[in-house]
Amino acid sequence: MYCRKCGAENADHAKFCGKCGAELVQIPQESTQEEKSAEKKVEENLQKDFEAEETENFQEIEQERKQEAEQQETKRRKNFRIAAAVGISAVLIAGVTTGVYFGMKDKQEKTFQTKIAMADKYLEDMEYEKAEELYLESIKIDPKERKSYDKLAEIYTTQGKEKKAEAILKKAKENGAVAKGQEVPKKEAQSNEKPAAEPVPDEKPSPNSSSQEENKGEEENKGEHTQDQDKIDDTKAVSLETYVDKVLVPKYGKCTAGTYESKYVKKDSEKKIVQPERLEKQKGVLASKLKDFDGDGEKELLVLMLKTGEEDKAKKDEKHNHVYLQMYEKKEKSIKLAAEYLALRNVMGNAETERQGIFLKESGGKIYICGSTANQYSLTARSHEYGMFAVNYDGTFREYASTKGLLTGEEHEKEITDISAKLEKIGLNATAKRMRGYSELWFEFDESGVEILAELTTTEQNGTEELSEFYETYDSSVLKPVQRKVTLKFDKKEIEAAAKRTEERLKKEQKKDEAYQKILDEYQEALLMGASEVQKDPEGYPNINPLLVFLTETDKGKTEIIYTMYDIDESGEKELLVGSRSNGGDERVVGVYCFDGVDAKNMFEDQTLAERSLLQIYENGTMYIYGSGGASYGNASFYRMDGEHTVIQTEQYTFDMEGHPEQPYYNDKETLSKEAFQKKLDSMGKTVSGLKWKTLSERITGEADPEAAKKKEAETENAGQSQEGIKTPENPIQQEEQTPVYSDLEIQKKLEEYYAKGTEDAKGEEMTVLEQESTKSEYLVKVTTKVPGNETVEQVLYEVTVNKITGETVQKRVLTDGKTVTFLLWEN
């Protein structure tokens, strides 16, 4: 029996190689006719190649010999009388022949070494076909060199071609191939008619039978073999179940769940940019999952590997942390890295807030590995990064949906449309809905029926006090470190907590939308009532700019009120901008509103954005307001949001052209000329542009006059008296609600009793009823069930809605086909 790794021959009953110690694989003695035929064909082809090449290699040398012999014979006949001279000529010709022969051998040796070096490189890069081709070519050049055979056997074994590996090692023995330094002594070779066999693996060559150089070569070869063996030892004698702990963790390290801090440091002193330090102490195996990912009946090992400090290809001076998907498969007795995929970019890096994670989603008989990155830079450098992917595995990672890296800016509408449509097809509906509603390319990690593998978050801890002090000096030491949380275990409580967080966030987003709608309704009503009525009752219109209403009314048909949504500080929550546009010209912002968790409020309550004021918003998050008191007097102020729904004034200048003509901009720290102040503005970068503004007139019907307002008021009163009411897209007037018959407590108890009996999909003891949401008329819950094979994890089986008035219950099956069942709860 031959060893698949070193090629040494062993006894048939041996379990381990006597030379290298590798485990031996017993090959069944009886082979099918097809296997015997295939093996014979491989041997015949190899033999033909060897014979053809040997003929080609020495054909030229034989031709030279014949030519020299003919010349020698001609000279012998012409100069028969001077035999001594003929003898000398013969000796010289023989010397030339020998020189040609050994010159060609040197050339062949160089070609052989070149091919071996190239083949070794291809083998290292796992380009097996190219390596195989070069090793075969090297065998044709030198059939006696053992290394090429051993490397081919290694390739065939890796590919699962055991018969082919056996055949090539057998051919090596037949050709008498040995490694450098293990050549058979010349006398021994001459005494045997057949090719010399390899030394017995357990025996060492005697010092008497080989030179010191040969012994040295043997030791070098032994060392090289040991090194090669070390490279593959980590794939031997372990199982997929133990591979992470026994091989990957000792080699690369392991990430630990917990919370870590990163201090702020200066990134660019000139631009006053500070960012959190990149986290480096967490690296290695982040998480792993053993599962049949490709559906072939055999399990594969998915590993999430965090690599730190990788150089950015686009920016050579920057380094980032990345998370890779690695898939390992078991091939015979070896475990191989079959595929790798760059999943999460720029993890736990320089962003103030981050949310990254990876989870599994099964749909349509396939397992989708999904993940996303959402990074936001909001303190001194305003920007965001979104990236998401969904892949499955069939021997390699295949992308189902992907942003192809990290996207920045606002231009990703096409990606949102395409990706959200694909995600809906595999049941990731919550993510698809939020993507379209908020233009954000990241996953909801508490989607129904998903299994979270890892989640990484970074949050900023600074409030108004710290930020105010920082913006005065730009000293990063006054800032609190960001908090980084690594979550790797997701039990029932954590899943419920994640679901609750998402539910609260969605409720907050709904409240924010309603609050902004209220602001727009106030402007709408003011336009309908007229400027004079608004001026009489300023307290009745606390959130609007009266001057804007007046201009719109007096400049009828030329000035219009416009609005849009924009995330000024990249906090993930968009602000409402209200502006004006005259005669189709440029937009002018006159109001900025943010949501404080309860209601919308004007961010500049003490700053009047009037006719002679100007507000500019820069891409870096700075807001600049210039208030003019005339041609030669005014105030210039700079603001930033503080993360707590208010603004901080970072700098303020008085403009006095009459009192300070040379340096009209001044404060208690410095004085600036017009040119110097303009340079200061230019250093902030670009102002925000390209926003999608809408006109307020698109939301309302009727004219901006008191008569239209009275008409609308009358319609509203009539709607309240009508049973059906009047319903418009902007202001739905609902039918008067009835008093609920059943309380939340009664419904919860009744549902628990109902599902304790079991359903067609699961047993009663396997299901849990989780309260989700309660409105005036409906009670909503989710019913979970345990995941088969993992009793510690639960997944959502049903989404259930109960009508509090009628008791009618709608059960939607989440895990498979979305089938709904309707029944009366109190009749079951």
Image: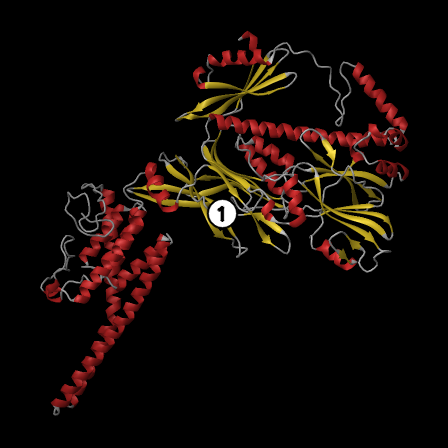
Residue 823 visible in the displayed image: no
Question: Can you name the residue that lies furthest to the bottom here?
Answer: 81
Q: Position of residue 623 (x, y in %)?
A: 72, 45
How are the residues colored?
secondary structure
Compared to residue 310, the image places residue 596 above or below, namely above
Q: Position of residue 496 (x, y in %)?
A: 51, 26
- In percent of the image, x 14 and y 65: which residue is there? 210
Question: Can you name the residue that lies furthest to the left here?
Answer: 191
Question: Left or right: 482 with respect to 215?
Answer: right
Q: Position of residue 763 (x, y in %)?
A: 43, 16
> Front-most of 219 and 668?
668
Question: Can you name the residue that lies furthest to the top here?
Answer: 827
> Front-most of 583 and 536?
536
Residue 484 visible in the displayed image: yes
Question: Left or right: 472 with respect to 311?
Answer: right
Toward which corner of the image does residue 63 lie, by quadrant?
bottom left
**Residue located beneath label 1 in the image:** 321
- In percent of the image, x 29 and y 65: which residue is there? 112
Q: Position of residue 480 (x, y in %)?
A: 58, 42
Query: Which element type, helix, strand or loop, lies under badge 1?
Result: strand
- In percent of the image, x 65 and y 50: which residue is there? 473
Q: Amino acid at mark 1?
A: Asn
Compared to residue 205, the image places residue 757 above or below, namely above
Residue count near mark 1 (Cα–Cα under 10 Å), binned few <14, some 14–19, many ≥20 = many
- In percent of the image, x 24 and y 53: which residue is there? 168
> Front-most of 422 and 784?
784
Question: Can you name the residue that lies furthest to the front here?
Answer: 668
